[in-house]
Image: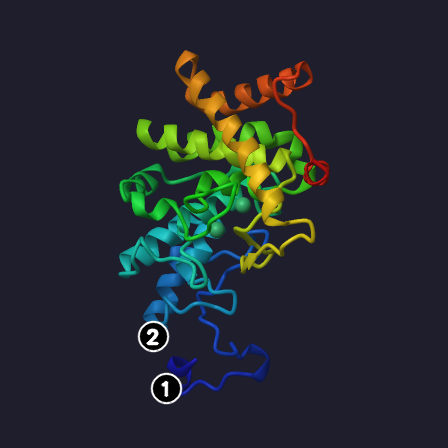
């Protein structure tokens, strides 16, 4: 805006930006999109404020991740914005927001995550930096902090439940993780999925519709005792996961699905059950 005024333009009130960056494109459906061509025109016109967060705490670079707009992610990086940019209100990085988009493709991708093209070279580069994989949350679903894999499961709308099993293989296809990261992510994803199945209350962050960070409210029955028991159940599942994992020789991206399916099918055999939080409260 200052650039326009400085160039002698008068800007109609209706077009005032209200202090928002001209590069602000964050929206729930990923529909507001800039292209490098237009971004370059804006840059040439003097709009150099490319890294200020909007009211939800997202910088334009992070908004581009949220929209899975990799052309713009690359453009911002070429302009000097760091690949380690993160959400202002939580240590969430681009890969976390990409996971949210894959779990909820939105209108731009016609609610079909298959239509989301990713930039494997860019993602590979970032995945070398292991520190960007966990945020600062502590929750039963993610004791060392939320990961992109746990975000895949955390807030999937109910209509997508039937696709839950497919999200992890899709994530792997779109991010091509190293063997080590794949092993780690498969475990994190399984853990988050188990917590979802058990309808556990969370103490970790969720992303709201405008990509704002929210901490999930504590449930009334969310007492320390109930959470303690719930944690024991989850740890039992994860021990079972660790025992079965070496026996599995197929593609690892399919293991979480098979493992959860197998546990569910044995749940009536007395090995384990998925108690709801309220039934645990009665124990
Ligand atoms: Zn959680
Ligand atoms: Zn978190």
Where 141 falls versus 204 (above or below)? Answer: above
Question: Circle 2 sits in a helix, a strand or a loop, which is it?
Answer: loop
Q: Quadrant of the C terminus?
A: top right
Residue at left offset 51%, top offset 69%: 55
> Can you give x and y, in whole percent of width and height, for residue 165 in the image?
57, 27
Badges 1 and 2: C-beta atoms under 8 Å apart?
Answer: yes
Badge 1 residue CB within 8 Å of ligand 2: no
Q: Is residue 23 visible?
A: yes
Residue at left offset 34%, top offset 58%: 76
> Can you give x and y, in whole percent of width and height, for residue 77 in the image?
30, 55
- Decide which of tag 1 and tag 2 comes sooner along the chain: 1
Where 201 falls versus 54 (above or below)? Answer: above
Residue 164's quadrant in the figure?
A: top right
Q: Is residue 190 left or right of residue 46?
A: right
Question: Circle 1 sits in a helix, a strand or a loop, which is it?
Answer: helix
Distance between mark 1 and mark 2 Cα atoms: 9 Å
Frontmost residue, 12 versus 138:
138
Q: Is residue 216 left or right of residue 62?
A: right
> Can you give x and y, in whole percent of width and height, for residue 218 in the image?
63, 55
Frontmost residue, 11 versus 71:
71
Label 1, residues with CA under 10 Å away: few <14, some 14-19, many ≥20: few
Which residue position is annotated with label 1? 6
Where 218 falls versus 274 (above or below)? Answer: below
Which residue position is annotated with label 2? 46
Badge 2 residue CB within 8 Å of ligand 2: no
Residue 47's quadrant in the figure?
A: bottom left
């Amino acid at each position: 805006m200052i650039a326009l005024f400085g160039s002698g333009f008068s800007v109609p009130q209706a077009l005032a930006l209200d202090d928002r960056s001209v590069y602000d494109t964050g929206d729930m459906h990923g529909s507001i999109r800039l292209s490098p061509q237009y971004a370059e025109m804006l840059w040439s016109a003097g709009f150099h404020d490319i890294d200020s967060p909007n009211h939800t705490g997202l910088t334009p670079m992070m908004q581009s991740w949220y929209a899975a707009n990799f052309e713009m992610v690359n453009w911002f990086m070429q302009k000097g914005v760091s690949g380690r940019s993160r959400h202002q209100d939580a240590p969430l990085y681009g890969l976390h927001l990409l996971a949210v988009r894959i779990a909820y493709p939105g209108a731009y991708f016609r609610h079909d995550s298959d239509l989301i093209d990713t930039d494997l070279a860019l993602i590979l580069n970032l995945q070398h930096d292991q520190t960007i994989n966990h945020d600062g949350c502590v929750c039963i679903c993610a004791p060392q902090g939320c990961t992109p894999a746990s975000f895949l499961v955390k807030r999937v709308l109910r209509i997508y439940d039937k696709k839950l099993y497919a999200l992890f293989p899709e994530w792997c296809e779109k991010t091509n993780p190293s063997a080590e990261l794949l092993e780690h992510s498969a475990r994190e994803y399984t853990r988050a999925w188990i917590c979802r199945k058990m309808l556990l209350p969370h103490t970790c962050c969720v992303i709201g519709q405008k990509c704002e960070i929210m901490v999930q409210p504590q449930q009334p029955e969310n007492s320390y005792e109930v959470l303690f028991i719930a944690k024991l159940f989850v740890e039992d599942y994860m021990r079972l996961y660790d025992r079965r994992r070496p026996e599995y020789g197929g593609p690892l991206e399919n293991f979480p699905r098979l493992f959860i399916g197998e546990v569910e099918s044995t749940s009536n055999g007395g090995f384990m059950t998925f108690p709801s939080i309220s039934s645990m409260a009665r124990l």
